[in-house]
Amino acid sequence: MNNSFGSLFTISTWGESHGGGIGVVIDGCPPLLNLTQQDIQTELDRRKPGQSNLTTPRKEADEVEILSGLFEGKTTGTPLAMLVRNKNANPKAYDHLKSVYRPSHADFTYDSKYGIRNWEGGGRSSARETIGRVAAGAVAKKILKKAEKIEILAYVSQMHTLHAAIDPEKVTLKKIESNPVRCPDTKVAAAMATKIEQARKDGDSLGGIITCVAKNVPAGLGEPVFNKLKADLAKAMLSIPASMGFQIGSGYNSVTQTGSEHNDPFYMDGQTVRTKTNNSGGIQGGISNGETILFTVAFKPTGTIFKEQDTVTTKKKNTKLSAKGRHDPCVLPRAVPIVESMAALVLVDHYLQQRARSGLFS
Amino acid sequence: MNNSFGSLFTISTWGESHGGGIGVVIDGCPPLLNLTQQDIQTELDRRKPGQSNLTTPRKEADEVEILSGLFEGKTTGTPLAMLVRNKNANPKAYDHLKSVYRPSHADFTYDSKYGIRNWEGGGRSSARETIGRVAAGAVAKKILKKAEKIEILAYVSQMHTLHAAIDPEKVTLKKIESNPVRCPDTKVAAAMATKIEQARKDGDSLGGIITCVAKNVPAGLGEPVFNKLKADLAKAMLSIPASMGFQIGSGYNSVTQTGSEHNDPFYMDGQTVRTKTNNSGGIQGGISNGETILFTVAFKPTGTIFKEQDTVTTKKKNTKLSAKGRHDPCVLPRAVPIVESMAALVLVDHYLQQRARSGLFS
Amino acid sequence: MNNSFGSLFTISTWGESHGGGIGVVIDGCPPLLNLTQQDIQTELDRRKPGQSNLTTPRKEADEVEILSGLFEGKTTGTPLAMLVRNKNANPKAYDHLKSVYRPSHADFTYDSKYGIRNWEGGGRSSARETIGRVAAGAVAKKILKKAEKIEILAYVSQMHTLHAAIDPEKVTLKKIESNPVRCPDTKVAAAMATKIEQARKDGDSLGGIITCVAKNVPAGLGEPVFNKLKADLAKAMLSIPASMGFQIGSGYNSVTQTGSEHNDPFYMDGQTVRTKTNNSGGIQGGISNGETILFTVAFKPTGTIFKEQDTVTTKKKNTKLSAKGRHDPCVLPRAVPIVESMAALVLVDHYLQQRARSGLFS
Amino acid sequence: MNNSFGSLFTISTWGESHGGGIGVVIDGCPPLLNLTQQDIQTELDRRKPGQSNLTTPRKEADEVEILSGLFEGKTTGTPLAMLVRNKNANPKAYDHLKSVYRPSHADFTYDSKYGIRNWEGGGRSSARETIGRVAAGAVAKKILKKAEKIEILAYVSQMHTLHAAIDPEKVTLKKIESNPVRCPDTKVAAAMATKIEQARKDGDSLGGIITCVAKNVPAGLGEPVFNKLKADLAKAMLSIPASMGFQIGSGYNSVTQTGSEHNDPFYMDGQTVRTKTNNSGGIQGGISNGETILFTVAFKPTGTIFKEQDTVTTKKKNTKLSAKGRHDPCVLPRAVPIVESMAALVLVDHYLQQRARSGLFS
């Protein structure tokens, strides 16, 4: 089940950049959730290409069809299948990649693994695969919100050397969506936009950091020992194309803290156990503690650049490559809903696990 | 299967710090591997407490018994069960923790999740659980070495503010094991040892970074899209107690690179496709590319400190806690074999997956 | 993953009788298999309604579209998604079932489980769900045939009281497909056809037995202890709608044999270990022994009959029901490819498992 | 995970007939269940050898040790590991089997699969493996009883040609345990005992049928489409050594019923939907309907007989074999708690699945 994620709320994605389309099957969605095509489309529209002049000019409506699992506007508990057709596919644009491996792409490794690759638009390794994740994430987010008022928000907190000054506890969806970069620090967002434009002109690309928070997560989610909440979040994030690292709470900064600096002291807030600081990022012993869950994901600069690069051909000869086509110089603005979706998928799965076994005896 | 890890080479761990012992069952070990108790014990001895004056003075022989799955010195393909009895358990040492939650430990979250916790020595959240991982990792490492000459080496590359100057491509087991810190830069290792001693005197604790390399990994391991090699490594590492972050290849440093700086150009090295740089950490598109796999893991300072801390009781009252007992001021030296083991478990699983399906048709 | 089957060659089905369609995703198909739409369609045509006057007059082309996982006529190792649109849906035909539970159907139990059911055509419990199984089974059969010349054949061996006289070792596809009943004993097949016609006139329905053989299965497939080959076959068969029982080899007849009558003596056939009898049905200790795998599946008479029956309404009142619409008086002829497909899915999965771990050491 | 069973309440068994012992790990047991060693031991005593003169004279106390997962008499939600040491092992008794394959045993198939087998006492294929199942089944039964008053009862309903006359709805544990055959029809039980004694004298063996009922199972358990309750029960039963078939409800007898004879009419019993007959065996559409779950399992005669048999050596020569040692001429009395245990494992897993997702929305 290498194309599936989750155990009780499981998604299986399929599809390539070019071909019949992209899809996802959700198995294990609780019944009786009100759900519309628009619930899904809204999130896909945050991911789709051509939203702004910062992203790839490739235009795709990415319109989703819900094929099963809904009856009279409610989920039935049976699999929800969703399909997005590929409309603006242009295989010819990839002819020049048929016999060459793009550096830091999946071309060479897919060939090594499978002995074959669909070289049109990256095939399965295309970021279009994440359409299925975002469609499923929309359902997961709705469940979490309706059941527990859990809110998941991601945003661009760093692009190349530009840092946003944001208190993650206070970020809002409105602020995030207020600009095409999806950086809630509007001043820095403007600088980021300029930087992206410059990278496009240079034929180069940029990376950055996405920060994600999940608020109102009840204490008790996460399954020791291997399916710790932080472990499943780390896997979810590192499964996203171009991701290079994950940090929970104070992350790598914990390294230069002593225990007395790092530990989060408990205190009573009325009848609620709270921590004064949140270096743990809302997770202790792999289980949520009721504080805001906080993590970051690093993304490398987009692999496709228009500068000439050294590489090799599929016939094993050295060569030079200058990419053509339509590409994002920076994937981060469109990766925001992907990060949120993967976080939602992890949380909804752990939420259902906890429902299965808790409160049975006392 | 929250206490299991892996799909084709699966380990299931069980046991608490205090109680009958700690164990692991390996399901899916290939038959006909030569294996001895000593193969396992050697690795457990690298993890056990009381190895040096840097670790907890709690002494445990941690002697392993192989209960099943071996016949006349060879694995039979049936489950390998291994057991380590708890010998030096001292539940009374934990009496003062019965009714209080230790900050940045799992006490509060286990209670929130299960409505009960074994407060003796941390129960299931004790790092003693990792005995099972290291025992299984010893088997995984032997398989990888015998089948493909794959070598996995981890070492302490940073402790608090002290950085080791090491080329990860050149590190050797001998160098790593040359000092009790397991830092192959012997000069910095000495400074780290001094720092640990100081932390112990201060009643405080230290964190750090472990770097891990896997050499001779053939191209083609890793299963898109969710079980990418980097994703499974990230999960494995974030499932280790006290881990706070994971980076593959250039990790968070990728963020301030442009694409033209980050991309790893391909070139032909005889008949082998190689990359000139290794910012990808040996993984592209989630699949190994034949280069050395390289990642780091951040560990927070040990949760248990002897300085007084604010916290709350299980009856939900504010209180103060001063820990007692025997604890490591820094877990990193003993975490080195755990990191190696988890990496080996991920790699052996992907290796078997690749065997299952490749080369069937052509 | 309740709508998924298999571990290394995994299928996930979705869809309802009425709605967007029926589909399946295959995850784990080995790369480089030659595959065409026709390979799939041929098997679907054996399952589709309206093939003969013995089955439901509901006409459906059940044309399949392969949406992903193929490139230039070969599988790529990525998910194969297949879609069959529902064309001849007629929700109005089910209006009279909206508020009543059909006896021995899934109406009441789906409502009990989910609190909602799609009452159009049985929703998810419709036998149309098996389209996905047959489409995936076509791929599994092709892999087994190409890799090991394994041939899987099922046929109707009993209908109501009519028994076919067939040596399962000698049955051929041609014989099976020589008549619409799919009973290779042509004389009995004719009597069965007459009996089905009579049942239709009576507004009643018939059950029967399907026998299945798998030839050329190498010794060594099957995974003790829980995933024994017979256990996975049993699960596969009891997951088919209307199935009521499963027998491997001499099955329930073993009960009245003594050990000396039942045991299959080994003998050497050249260099091959063979058994003189095959009461074991080709499986010993849960593992194939190289003999023909042989099992049967019992099917109850179709639930939908046109005679008046006692039942209750969804409002919990006693009532009477006389079904309307288009239904098969006997599902067996169309269940033959379903049984074959499920057997193929089990075998291909075990075949890949065996490839993963065998021959690594010696 | 071939030695694991279940998804939310998962057991993993390990161990061989001869070696360190036999064990099981339960992962996913709900917390706060009161549990004692005696709860487990009582069930193991029903399975152990040497209970009566009908079973093997090999004496084993089969005393269980609970190694983890319990604290102050309650389950903690962490893995329950249980161990039974092999005490009365006698490897020398198997010397004559070192180089010969016993007919209708797993000797040849294990060698074919793994290239190695532990020939002492059957190794992993020994029925001693079921100790782990029964230990885990004891926990599952306790959960089901405490949570929903579900009672699971199995009994010997047929041995060779002797049929018990029992109404499965009225069978009680007391009646079953009233004689060593575990057949609640005491008159037939006596005849069965005589028959077993005769088989022992003849050096031969007997098979039979075990019937199992599960009472008070709420409607709604079972997960379409592949994890139907009947499918998981079938797999569970066919995973038991020596099992040859499974029937749910009217099973193979359904074949000669017409739909109007087979269908179970619904009626209102106060506010409860009931069926007048129970040909469905309590399961419709793969989901429990609130009626008693009813199924049977066929067991072949024990493979080991003392009459001379034709067979082959491991060097591939024809030979003769006359078994020696201590064996049951009929496994059925001891298989009764195994059948109950496997049924309980299936039901508790589906029960937790249903808790996970139901009642979240409405």
Image: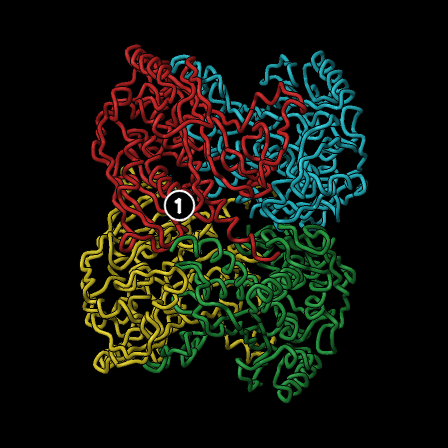
Chain colours: A green, B yellow, C cyan, D red
Between A75 and B139, which is closer to the camera in this rendering?
Answer: A75
Q: Is residue C325 visible?
A: yes
Q: Which quarter of the picture shows residue C327?
A: top right
- What residue is pinned by disc 1? D146
Q: Amino acid at mark 1?
A: Lys
Q: Position of residue C95 (x, y in %)?
A: 78, 42
Compared to B169, does D250 lie above or below? above
- Name which residue lies at 53% across and 73% down: A215
Q: Is residue C121 left or right of residue B321?
A: right
Q: Position of residue A346 (x, y in %)?
A: 53, 62
Q: Dot 1: what SS? A: helix
Q: Position of residue B130 (x, y in %)?
A: 32, 59
Between A18 and B59, which is closer to the camera in this rendering?
Answer: B59
Q: Chain of mark 1?
A: D
Compared to A121, does C50 lie above or below? above
Report the number of discs. 1
In the rendered image, which quarter contains the C terminus of chain C? top left
Q: Which quarter of the picture shows residue C263?
A: top left
Q: Is residue A28 left or right of residue B325?
A: right
Q: Position of residue D65 (x, y in %)?
A: 25, 44
Residue positioned most to the front: D270
Q: Which quarter of the picture shows residue B360?
A: top right
Q: Is residue D292 left or right of residue A307?
A: left
Q: Is residue B184 visible?
A: no
- Name which residue lies at 52% across and 40% down: C352
Between B297 and B215, which is closer to the camera in this rendering?
Answer: B297
- Name which residue lies at 39% across and 31% down: D110
Q: Is residue C288 left or right of residue D183?
A: right
Compared to D76, does B200 lie above or below? below
Label 1 Cα crowd, 10 Å radius (few <14 / some 14-19 / many 20+): some
